[in-house]
Amino acid sequence: MGGIALGHGLISGEWQKDALRIGYSGTILEEFSNLNAPAGNALLTGTTVPAGEIWCLHHATAIDLITPITSISLFIQLGAFIVALGVDLAPSILRDLIYNGYIILPAGASIRAFFNGTVLGDDIYLRYICTRVDIDQ
């Protein structure tokens, strides 16, 4: 009697190799900054999830280190589709807007932070941690 082969399953009534296998392939830890933000508004955009991967977002932060600005927004952008992760109205200096949770990002998605009310020369940051999963194995 044979054992169960990993990567196989009952597909269309037959024991076959699964067509799609996914698994952990790394951790994404990124920081984006503008140490001379424009007056008014500024946008920081993270790396776009490449084809053949999905990312699981665990934690993201955005901060203006210089000025208590009007607002900070964290969101995910996929084409014209936007998922809001959080908004902080009138954040004080040195207070991060923080997102903790689990969101799956498909290929083409990016994490972004929008800063409203920046002063010329502000130091702004976007940081996040994701798990990378290859789906084209």
Image (cartoon, rainbow, N blue to C red):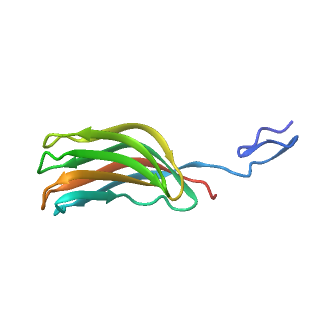
The image shows residue 127 at horizontal and vertical percentages of 30, 50
The image shows residue 85 at horizontal and vertical percentages of 38, 41
Residue at 31% x, 51% y: name it: 113
Left or right, 113 with respect to 101, comes to left
114, 50: nearer the viewer: 114
108, 51: nearer the viewer: 108
Left or right, 57 with respect to 121, comes to right
Q: Quadrant of residue 118?
A: bottom left
Question: Is 48 above or below relative to 93?
Answer: below
The image shows residue 108 at horizontal and vertical percentages of 51, 59
The image shows residue 63 at horizontal and vertical percentages of 22, 47
Q: Quadrant of the C terminus?
A: bottom right
Q: Quadrant of the N terminus?
A: top right
29, 89: nearer the viewer: 89
44, 120: nearer the viewer: 120
Residue at 34% x, 46% y: name it: 74
Q: How many marks?
A: 0
Residue at 74% x, 52% y: name it: 19
